[in-house]
Amino acid sequence: MSIPKPTIPKGTRDFGPLQMARRNYILDTIKDTFRLFGYQQLETPAMENLSTLTGKYGEEGDQLLFKILNSGDFLKNVKPEDIAAGTSKVLPNVAEKGLRYDLTVPFARYVVMNRNEIVFPFKRFQIQPVWRADRPQRGRYREFYQCDADVVGTDSLICEAEILLMIRRVFSGLGLEDYTIKINNRKILTGISEVIGEPGKEGELCVAIDKLDKIGWGKVQEELLQRGFTALAIEKLSPVVLLNAGNSEKLVFLEDFLKGSAIGLQGLKELKEVFEVLAAFGEGEEHVGFDLVLARGLSYYTGAIFEVKVNGVSIGSVAGGGRYDNLTGVFGLPDVPGVGFSFGVDRIYDVLEELKLFPEDQINATKVMVGFLDQEGKEYGLKALSAMRAEGISAEIYPDEAKLKKQFNYADKKNISFVLMAGSEEIAQQKYTLKNMKSGEQQMVNLAEAIAVLQSNEIL
């Protein structure tokens, strides 16, 4: 019988050493920034009770939940009439748990369960995989990482301004220079729908204008007509969509445009305050663009909304988020306001790869390899290995007796920067030959000198 070829489930991926080094480079940069701004790391279980997950993502989201069969005889509670009644009757009897669909609902559940221990405002970040039973395609996976940061228990707009600062710091750390952080406010969009004479239809309005970049203003107008908007309303909307101006000019324009909408003016006031807080930090508005028609997640967000796009690349938005009024209400703890955002780690990876911004030294896991030719050389090399590791230098030894060519090929393929040879001549002089694998230069040094070179990154 032939042994089946090993595979992995569709929509999942392996990450080899190169990919993991690059992913950790991104994640370490993000974590460093989160901690600098006072965020604490949180993790929740891969599985949640289905009662926690269902009903939180809409009907389509519920369909994409991965359910986990109960352990043991999972059919013991299923009756023949249940099977005849269909899946909805069978499922509660065979599966009580599911894999998490996102990090937001588990975070809300955590806040409610731990509300007496949490210090509010509570600043948390979470970097974990999530699972969705979606149809796999390019850029869409069934298992992928989310990288969320949220502040709950405050409606202070300092939090929004700090999100802008955190995004700028992370992108600077990753070497990204040409990008735009789009910002808008849900209340402004509500106000626009009121002013153009379509109150209560901001949901339909924003579903349509959210497609502006993809299909253009002409097609968006057609869709608005199909959604029941009048020609007069579209005519009134046109100056908003077509306005091409800087942040301050847009704020001035909206002050006049929204004068008939109290909620619209409130959104404008909040947005102005975010820019004022930025100025109070001593920061400018670099990379921050007020986008009057930015419309993401409108059923979820209630205040500021953000979306980040790196310019000049084929990848879409790489980060986004916004403010919400009632994250924990579905679990019986109402009126806990918050604001949060998420970095798209996989998309940032693709951007850095496309722009060739991954630094090579982030990929080299091992700094130096010890090589030897016989038992005496191995024992002499092991002493050096321990001494180098004690100094914090990443080091390994070629484990088998082998020809020098094979050992150097191994070091070359692993991108190891240096090889420290321990042969009979080196033992006789109580020294080592240290070879720089990039330059090819080598010299005989004692152990202390070798350690000094490895710690200083000197070229031999």
Image: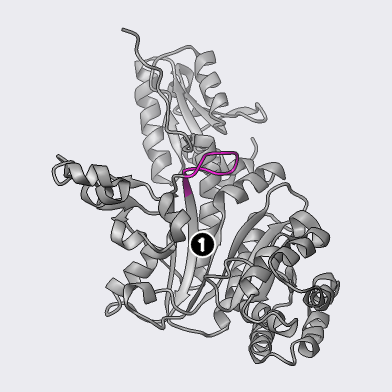
Location of mark 1 (residue): 32
Q: Quadrant of the N terminus?
A: top left
Q: Residue furthest top?
A: 1
Expressed as whole percent of the image width and height from the top left, the position of residue 287 reads 74, 67
When the figure is inspected, residue 448 is found, relative to residue 428, above or below; the finding is below
Residue found at x 37% / y 72%: 330
Residue 77 seen from this side? yes
Expressed as whole percent of the image width and height from the top left, the position of residue 178 reads 76, 58
SS class, disc 1: helix
| 240 falls in the magenta region | no
- Which region of the structure is painted magenta? 134-144
Dominant secondary structure, magenta: loop
Taking depth in this image into account, of 351 and 262 the one nearest to the observer is 262
When the figure is inspected, residue 402 is found, relative to residue 427, above or below; the finding is above
For residue 385, which quarter of the picture?
top left
When the figure is inspected, residue 4 is found, relative to residue 72, above or below; the finding is above
For residue 382, which quarter of the picture?
top left
Residue 374 left/right relative to 357: left
Residue found at x 47% / y 83%: 154
Q: Residues within 10 Å of mark 1 (few under 14, many from 20)?
A: some
Q: What residue type is disc 1 on?
A: Asp
Residue found at x 73% / y 82%: 197
Expressed as whole percent of the image width and height from the top left, the position of residue 377 reads 40, 20
The image's colouring method is one colour
Residue found at x 58% / y 70%: 298
Residue 70 seen from this side? no
Residue 312 left/right relative to 344: right
Expressed as whole percent of the image width and height from the top left, the position of residue 289 reads 74, 71
